[in-house]
Image (cartoon, helix red, strand yellow):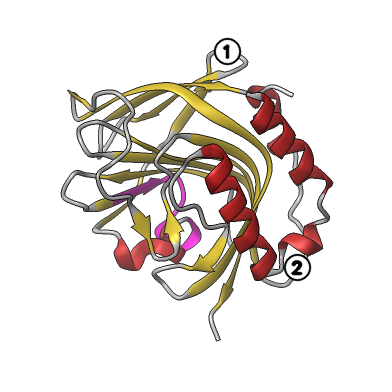
Amino acid sequence: MEPRTAAQAAEDASAPPGADERFAGYGVMGVPFALGHVLALRRFPVSTVGPAYSAVWIRDPAGRWTMAASAPPAQSCARYFGAAVELQVEAPVEIAWTGARELRVEVPAPVSLEWSLSLRATPLTSAMSAACAAIPDGVWRGRAFSRAMGLVAAGALRTGTLRLAGTTPNGHHFVARPRRVWLVEDSTASLDGTALGRPAPLPQQAALGDFWLPQRGLFMAGWSAFATAS
């Protein structure tokens, strides 16, 4: 399956079973750039807390975070990560697939972002996708299992720290359940008219709570669940 096909299938997905807050879709877990920025993308056609939405995460070289989403902060990513985010805005996030493995993301205002990505599969990502798809959803909900899978994926894909379970800055427990995985082969971006340079690992890996943005671009399709920490 190509990434665009997985993205199209996600538009017709249903929410995974459970009593917690759940989202299904796809996204770019994060891409670090040579000038010190980090970009991430979330597209959730399925949400149990509000409408479908798309969101872009932007971290600048000084470590300040912006989240722009097509739904209000209380119904999008800022619901879980907003305590560590300086600017939360509701804005149009436009995603256009220009090929089976190429996409373009634009946020026209109040942040001006133009971001292009190309993705690729490798024997390793194909094997990981097959393994992920074969594991029952109920097994993924175990935080110990998800943490172990994150360690395995981090070592295999050379992403730096990668956690598929943990606690967000707003105090919610999260579990991320990938079904398919691809690498970001190349990416270019400009923010407010300034080019961000080539993708490159950061001197210090970026994180929001227990969620670490990978040091190597990853694209995943799957679901996430959040529960209020006890």
Image: 77 above or below 229: above
Q: Is residue 113 visible?
A: yes
| Element under disc 2 | loop
**Nearer to the camera, 81 or 141:** 141
Which residue has dot 1 on it? Answer: 99
Residue 224 percent across, percent down from the top left: 62, 56
Q: Are marks 2 and 1 in contact (CB under 8 Å)?
A: no
Is residue 170 placed above or below 24 in the rendered structure? below
Asked if residue 226 is positioned above or below residue 150 in the image, the reply reads: below
Residue 18 badge: 2
Left or right, 83 with respect to 185, comes to left
Among the 4 quarters of the image, the one containing residue 85 = bottom left
Residue 188: % across, % down? 34, 21
Q: Which residues are magenta?
A: 66-76
Q: Nearer the viewer, residue 46 or 155?
A: 155
Cα distance between the residues tagged 2 and 1? 35 Å
Q: Residues within 10 Å of mark 2 (few under 14, many from 20)?
A: few
Quarter holding the N terminus is top right
Where residue 115 sits: x, y (%)? Answer: 36, 25
170 is within the stretch colored magenta: no
Amino acid carrying label 1: it is: Gly
Give me the residue at 45% from left, 53% from top: 161
Name, please, the residue furthest toward the bottom.
230
Percent coordinates x, y for residue 143 in the rendering: 65, 69
State the quadrant of the C terminus.
bottom right
